[in-house]
Image (cartoon, coloured by chain):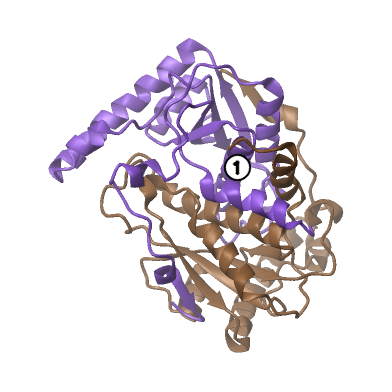
Chain colours: A brown, B purple
Amino acid sequence: MNFTPEQRAAVYEAIHNRRDIRKFSPTELEEDKVQRILLAGHHAPSVGFMQPWDFILISSSSQKEALALAADKERRALAIHFAAEGRDDKFLQLKVEGLREAPLTVCITCDPTRGGDHVLGRNSIPETDILSVACAIQNMWLAAYAEGIAMGWVSFYKKSDVRRILAIPPHVEPVALLSFGYTDHYPKRPILEESGWAKRTNFDSLIHHETW
Amino acid sequence: MNFTPEQRAAVYEAIHNRRDIRKFSPTELEEDKVQRILLAGHHAPSVGFMQPWDFILISSSSQKEALALAADKERRALAIHFAAEGRDDKFLQLKVEGLREAPLTVCITCDPTRGGDHVLGRNSIPETDILSVACAIQNMWLAAYAEGIAMGWVSFYKKSDVRRILAIPPHVEPVALLSFGYTDHYPKRPILEESGWAKRTNFDSLIHHETW
């Protein structure tokens, strides 16, 4: 602890400027940077120190193609719902994943059986296992930013498809597909804000005192 | 982006040295630091930019006491399960929360209805809403570290108790109670590792290539 103002500013810069990216250049990633990003994930907090995560690194063309096809199926299925709301034109213009282009995609998983029957603090709230995995994802995102590497979180897929493609055991949850790569355009604002899809909520409206 | 080695090191220091704290000193927290920590939470990624979080700030003695009683009920209930495993002695020695001592506790919640019926990317994986809230928690944890403030994530409670005490609407999920305060002892290793409760998993055993 006891950060200097410069160190503190670096943490806030990563937190505030981190973006969700879908366009990647083909430049390969340096192995040491990838290792540091993964290690940042492994150093996330986890309920009862259960560390429920695994990391599957995907860089072969055949596996990337299989995941991209699974994601595209889901994207087209979702377009039908947005069509009913009259938002399908805007939706279909959005690029929702960069699985083919990204030199590396990591599937981060959650094994709910890790740590035995009674993981400290998970008895009361079982989903704290996947919440721990989400903390690992955020660590990886900030680490990637610090390394000058872009990351995109893809959540367009059926879990059963990803489980089959990556041979994930039936009891293990694929929590996210995370694409990593360099990018030519790292936007200042969230891409869904830039594209007019959604707005940032007013901060003060989210703060309550003593009760809701 | 384009961090200097010093800026990058600051991000990694926060990620690697952040600990889950249960002992707090009574020193009050500065308002500007608290605001920056909460704002770091609000700048987390969220599925479809839905920003499902709210922040309930608790600092009154009566509310702290009510939450502490709810947590203690859950702790004693859990001790019964650990007794069956012969681990109750060790469990009862662990301090699992600092709700009474911490000058500030924040309940972070998740409103699954925010953003309408079809939040982009949440159609396929509904729990991406609480995963977004977990990313906000991790941002707040790292921001707190950068501010020299300790944080503890309490997950010992029944949601129905917390909902009643904090008057949270029935459709909103209380995701976590986060205690904030200064501390005299910020341990180098996770407290569950220091106390011999659990060990850090070997990193290499968690890495897979192309498939599980």
Q: Nearer the viewer, residue A45 or A33?
A: A33
Q: Nearer the viewer, residue A40 or B6?
A: B6
Q: Nearer the viewer, residue B190 or B61?
A: B190
Where A45 sits versus A182, above or below? above
Q: Give the x, y percent position of residue A38.
A: 55, 64
Chain letter for mark 1, please.
Answer: B
Q: Which quarter of the figure is the N terminus of chain A placed in? A: top right
User: What residue sits 63% from the left and 87% below the top?
Assistant: A61
Q: Is residue A152 visible?
A: yes
User: What residue sits 69% from the left and 72% below the top?
Assistant: A76
Which quadrant of the figure has residue B147? top right
Q: Give the x, y percent position of residue A86.
A: 80, 57
- Mark 1: amino acid: Leu
**Label 1 packing within 10 angstroms: few (<14), some (14-19), many (20+):** many
User: What residue sits 25% from the left and 52% below the top?
Assistant: A117
**B106 sits left or right of A52 in the view:** right
Which quadrant of the figure has residue B155? top left
Q: Give the x, y percent position of residue B34.
A: 65, 27
- Report the number of discs: 1
Q: Is residue B118 visible?
A: no
Where A207 sits versus A92, above or below? above
The residue beneath circle 1 is B142
Q: Give the x, y percent position of residue B129.
A: 58, 48
Q: Nearer the viewer, residue B136 or A156?
A: B136
Extreme bottom residue here? A62
Element carrying mark 1 = helix
Where A183 sits versus B16, above or below? below
User: What residue sits 37% from the left and 53% below the top?
Assistant: A50
Q: Which quarter of the figure is the C terminus of chain A placed in? A: top right
**A56 sits left or right of A177 in the view:** left
